[in-house]
């Protein structure tokens, strides 16, 4: 976990002090609270919440009752905390913000995963994440049952349409990339995006890549071109794929499907952290 990032968020919210709590709650006050589920979904962020409380106040007792990845129902209790009332109040919104968003992503991801569970396809997220929160949003995707694509620009080569156009074409883009990796002594997979059959043929003629992304191809078009792609090259479908069209893409025999909506079009799950007496 990026502890420096957590420190930044704490400073953003607490600043010079949680004066609402400091003003009316005695420093020695001990309280108890529970995280209540208010909406059906996939729970995510419990482990993160535990780390947040312990990083801020090691004396907090955190009792986990439900594991991340569990399908939850309204009324269930995810965890119970005991300790400084001031600490509980100061972290209440921060913990809820993370858990509601992570649970929303995990819930949406699981809906997509269940739709294609009977097909030999792997569901992936994208880099369409909230700046600064990618680690946590992609963590939620994994909790929901899908896999992460690349984490950033550093762990995989992804030659998209703009790369190809700026490089002067597919041949230049691939050749320069291969030379770059050799010069830098880097061992990174190369994926290339193709927008039509002509570009696909160019890529197959040139070779030297690990995965082909068929961007905005219809399921029918994918079926028609998959048999010409060697088994040694991975295949991925991407571009405007929705819940309504996901199964048709999975039926094509494509190996990977990437869906940006997993992290950019989710609804936060309704949760509440309430004092218990």
Image: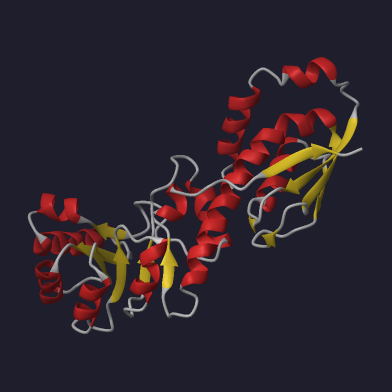
Q: Quadrant of the C terminus?
A: top right
Task: Establish if 11 lies above or below 267.
Answer: above
Q: Position of residue 200 (x, y in %)?
A: 15, 71
- Percent of width and height locating residue 265: 44, 48
Quadrant in which residue 181 is drawn? bottom left
Q: Residue at x 44, y 80 (%)?
A: 119
Left or right, 229 with reference to 97: left
Judged from this view, the residue extending furthest toward the front is: 244
Give above or below for 174 relative to 52.
below
Q: Which of 148 and 144 is in front in this view?
A: 144
Q: Which of 184 and 31 is in front in this view?
A: 31
Q: Which residue is drawn at 84% across and 30% down?
A: 85
Image side of residue 39 versus residue 254, left or right: right
Residue at point 88% right, 21% down?
A: 26
* Type of colouring: secondary structure
Question: How many marks can you see?
Answer: 0
Tell me if I can see residue 40 in this picture.
yes
Is residue 139 visible in this depiction of the protein? Answer: no
Residue 236's spot in the image, x, y percent? Answer: 31, 69
Picture residue at 45% right of the left edge, 55% below the top: 262
Nearest the camera: 268 or 235?
268
Residue 29 location in percent, x, y? 90, 27
Give the side of residue 249 with respect to residue 98, left or right: left
């Amino acid at each position: 976990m990026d502890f420096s990032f957590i420190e930044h968020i704490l400073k953003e919210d607490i600043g010079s002090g949680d004066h609402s709590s400091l003003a009316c709650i005695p420093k020695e006050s001990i309280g108890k609270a529970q995280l209540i589920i208010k909406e059906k979904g996939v729970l995510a962020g419990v482990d993160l919440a535990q780390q947040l409380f312990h990083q801020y106040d090691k004396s907090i007792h955190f009792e986990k009752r439900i594991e991340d990845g569990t399908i939850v129902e309204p009324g269930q209790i995810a965890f119970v905390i005991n300790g400084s009332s001031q600490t509980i109040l100061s972290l209440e919104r921060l913990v809820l913000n993370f858990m509601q968003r992570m649970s929303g992503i995990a819930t949406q991801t699981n809906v997509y995963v269940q739709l294609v569970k009977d097909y030999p396809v792997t569901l992936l997220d994208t880099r369409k994440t909230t700046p600064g929160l990618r680690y946590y949003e992609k963590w939620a995707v994994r909790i929901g049952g899908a896999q992460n694509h690349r984490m950033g620009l550093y762990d995989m080569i992804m030659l998209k349409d703009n790369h190809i156009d700026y490089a002067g074409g597919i041949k230049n883009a691939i050749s320069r990339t291969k030379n770059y990796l050799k010069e830098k002594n880097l061992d990174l997979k190369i994926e290339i995006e193709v927008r039509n059959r002509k570009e696909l043929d160019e890529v197959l003629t040139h070779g030297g890549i690990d995965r082909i992304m068929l961007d905005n191809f219809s399921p029918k078009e994918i079926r028609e071109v998959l048999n010409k792609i060697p088994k040694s090259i991975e295949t991925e479908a991407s571009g405007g794929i929705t819940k309504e069209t996901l199964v048709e893409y999975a039926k094509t025999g494509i190996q990977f499907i990437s869906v940006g909506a997993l992290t950019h079009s989710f609804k936060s799950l309704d949760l509440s952290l309430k004092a218990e007496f």
